[in-house]
């Protein structure tokens, strides 16, 4: 027997993913900021001996298809035939959250359960909600929850079980609009009756969406009734809007909110005047147009100081451990070729990358704390004004911040942007943001050549990357991709004390990808690099494959003050950025040899060029999947050109200033 399907719907940042994890026991990423879930995820839970398939839909504020995540959620609710829909509501923002609830009801879905999450926070704010009265007012079951503490999960499972087996009767309440609007709805329903649409969709919902001029619904209706009939409907709507003097979309939204407001009086009350919360007090500084940026600089400088102060000693210890292991192993392997492959190729190359695990883990640990506390959403608000000047909406800062971890999910996160123009620009500039792989290169070079100022040097490379990303966004949005900018809407969550369990789990999951790459792509890259360095003759003769490859590109890389070894490293870095370090490890043999072979200026140029040049293969694939090959190719060529120009500039300016 097929499993019953449970869909989780709700606004962004209402705790949907936490409920999903509580139900399924999975460990999907939970962050205290909106836009964490950008695609639907699936898991299974068991109750009373029966398994249920849970589908976590992207968080949306409504079901009007303005963005891909809204479209994904809406299409699943319309065509996925879920046996139960759990609509998760933030108890501190019931009025706003119920808009989505009412839209779900208007879709004709009756198998809905309301999960009233964050009930503890609502009580602290003096908001009193009676779940029984709320259930009676809405016509569906209501479960009060605190998903973060697992409170209410057992009751929710029971309600899901009962509804999936037809043991619960519901009567979802839907708004009745002004007579003029209702006449328009009836007129459109009359036009759609008798068509195939009647068998597949609720006609009242289609009529309301046509009144709101929903593009996707207009295309759907066009396919079934033809251009002439649709034109007649839209003309009728236009005449009604002329009589109202406003767009029908605004009229319906306004009347819907009035309906919800009246509804909440039946089950919600406020205990006295709300005092200014700690969140409000902190936000007066952290989102202030001046103090906010000062705080931002202090926070991220502190992040880098924390990462390097704790991470570098551990990185050195781990590097020494791999070196010692290689030295111990070498005398035990008689075959020269096998010894070279294992000691110099695999342990030297992969070990060089793995030694950076402490730095990567600590960076993720620091970012996870900032996410869990709720600071990242403030960064998005703070950056809104700056982002707009460069042709991007403030909301685009979220995929950019995600890029600090990995550019692949960050490119996917651009789906949350409503306009195609914004999505293309955001995914174009995202690979400029240094991911964790490039952190290993930056931290290696900063630690080896700038031991007394490594945090400032690393921060300066990040700042160059961000400036280049913003300037590129301005260029592309003004001269390549044109269109309207989407509005900036983001919810500022309450500041919370971070859950250390969540922070450590999240940091571990993200870091695991780094280790996994070391065991797969980096391992393969290290073996290839070792082979190219030792065949047909050993490196140093000028005739190894690696030297020939490096010499071919050397005239070009020399413009940036770098040699053939840097050319080979950057080439292998296209597979994965960590390969830049593993290649250096194989080509030079030791960190000391690298220190003596390069100047600090060359190291800085290499750190910047590695950060800016062509994205890794996985990121190129993600851009192609989210757009097309043309855009992925354009992004790649543009990044090569920008990295070359910046690298040449830094080298020649540095030479002119005369640093060593």
Image (tube, rainbow, N blue to C red):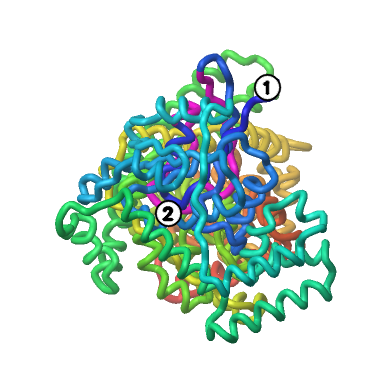
Image-quadrant location for residue 411: bottom right
Q: Quadrant of residue 141?
A: top left
Decide whether residue 44 is among the magenta residues.
yes
Residue 67 seen in the current view: yes
**Which label belongs to residue 97?**
2
Q: Are marks 1 and 2 in contact (CB under 8 Å)?
A: no
Q: Residue at x 26, y 45 (%)?
A: 121
Q: Viewer-proximal residue, 301 or 569?
A: 301
The secondary element bearing badge 2 is classed as: helix
Q: Which residue lies at the image location 49% right of the left edge and 36% below the top edge? A: 28
Q: Secondary structure at mark 1?
A: helix
Which of 241 and 420 lies nearest the eye of the viewer?
Answer: 241
- Please check the rendered image and state whether residue 518 is part of the magenta-colored stretch, yes or no: no
Q: Choose between 555 and 383: the one closer to the eye.
A: 383
In the image, residue 630 sits, relative to residue 303, either above or below, namely below
Please state the extent of the stretch shown in magenta in the rendering.
22-47
Q: Position of residue 419 (x, y in %)?
A: 60, 68
Q: Residue at x 49, y 50 (%)?
A: 173
For marks 1 and 2, give the CA distance. 63 Å
- Percent of width and height locating residue 616: 63, 51
Compared to 285, does 583 lie above or below?
above
């Amino acid at each position: 027997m097929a499993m019953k399907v449970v869909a989780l719907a709700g606004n962004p940042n209402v705790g949907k993913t936490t409920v999903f994890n509580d139900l399924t026991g999975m460990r999907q990423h939970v962050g205290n900021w909106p836009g964490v879930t950008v695609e639907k995820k699936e898991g299974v839970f068991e109750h009373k001996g029966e398994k249920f398939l849970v589908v976590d839909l992207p968080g949306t504020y409504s079901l009007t298809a303005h963005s891909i995540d809204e479209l994904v959620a809406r299409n699943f609710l319309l065509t996925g035939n879920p046996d139960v829909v759990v609509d998760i509501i933030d108890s501190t923002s019931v009025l706003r959250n119920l808009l989505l609830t009412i839209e779900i009801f208007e879709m004709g879905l009756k198998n809905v359960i309301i999960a009233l999450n964050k009930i503890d926070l609502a009580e602290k704010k003096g908001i009193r909600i009676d779940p029984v009265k709320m259930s009676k007012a809405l016509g569906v079951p209501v479960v009060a929850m605190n998903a973060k503490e697992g409170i209410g999960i057992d009751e929710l499972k029971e309600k899901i079980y009962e509804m999936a087996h037809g043991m619960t009767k519901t009567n979802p309440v839907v708004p009745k609009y002004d007579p003029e609007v209702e006449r328009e709805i009836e007129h459109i329903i009359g036009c759609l009756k008798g068509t195939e649409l009647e068998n597949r969709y609720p006609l009242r919902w289609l009529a309301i969406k046509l009144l709101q001029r929903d593009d996707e619904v207009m295309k759907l209706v066009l396919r079934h009734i033809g251009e002439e009939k649709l034109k007649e409907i839209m003309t009728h709507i236009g005449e009604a809007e002329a009589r109202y003097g406003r767009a029908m979309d605004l009229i319906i939204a306004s009347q819907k909110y009035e309906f919800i407001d009246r509804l909440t009086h039946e089950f919600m009350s406020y205990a006295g005047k709300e005092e200014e919360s700690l969140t409000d007090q902190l936000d007066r500084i952290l989102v202030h147009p001046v103090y906010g940026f000062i705080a931002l600089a202090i926070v991220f400088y502190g992040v880098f100081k924390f990462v390097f102060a704790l991470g570098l000693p551990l990185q050195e210890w781990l590097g020494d451990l791999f070196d010692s292991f290689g030295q111990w192993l070498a005398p035990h392997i008689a075959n020269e070729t096998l010894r070279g492959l294992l000691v110099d190729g695999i342990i030297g190359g992969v070990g060089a990358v793995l030694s950076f695990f402490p730095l990567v883990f600590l960076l993720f640990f620091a970012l996870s704390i900032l996410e869990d506390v709720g600071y990242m959403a403030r960064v998005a608000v703070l950056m809104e004004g700056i982002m707009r000047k460069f042709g991007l909406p403030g909301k685009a800062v979220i995929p950019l911040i995600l890029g600090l971890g990995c550019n692949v999910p960050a490119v996917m996160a651009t789906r949350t942007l409503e306009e195609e123009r914004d999505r293309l620009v955001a995914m174009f500039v995202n690979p400029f943001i240094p991911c964790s792989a490039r952190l290993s290169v930056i931290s290696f070079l900063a630690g080896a050549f700038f031991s007394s100022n490594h945090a400032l040097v690393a921060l300066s490379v990040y700042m160059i990357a961000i400036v280049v990303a913003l300037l590129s966004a301005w260029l592309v949005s003004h001269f390549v991709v044109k269109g309207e900018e989407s509005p900036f809407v983001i919810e500022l969550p309450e500041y919370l004390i971070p859950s250390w369990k969540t922070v450590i789990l999240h940091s571990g999951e993200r870091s695991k990808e780094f280790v996994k790459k070391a065991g797969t792509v980096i391992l393969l890259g290290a073996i290839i690099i070792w082979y190219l360095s030792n065949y047909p003759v050993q490196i140093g003769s000028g005739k190894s494959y690696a030297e020939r490859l490096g010499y071919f590109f050397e005239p070009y890389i020399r413009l940036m003050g770098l040699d053939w070894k840097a050319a080979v490293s950057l080439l292998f870095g296209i597979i994965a950025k960590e390969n830049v370090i593993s290649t250096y490890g194989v080509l030079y043999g030791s960190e000391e040899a690298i220190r003596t072979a390069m100047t600090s200026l060359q190291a800085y140029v290499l750190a910047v060029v590695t950060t800016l040049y062509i994205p890794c293969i996985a990121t190129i694939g993600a851009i192609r999947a989210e757009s097309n090959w043309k855009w992925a190719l354009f992004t790649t060529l543009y990044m090569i050109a920008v990295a070359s120009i910046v690298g040449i500039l830094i080298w020649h300016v540095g030479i002119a200033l005369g640093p060593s």
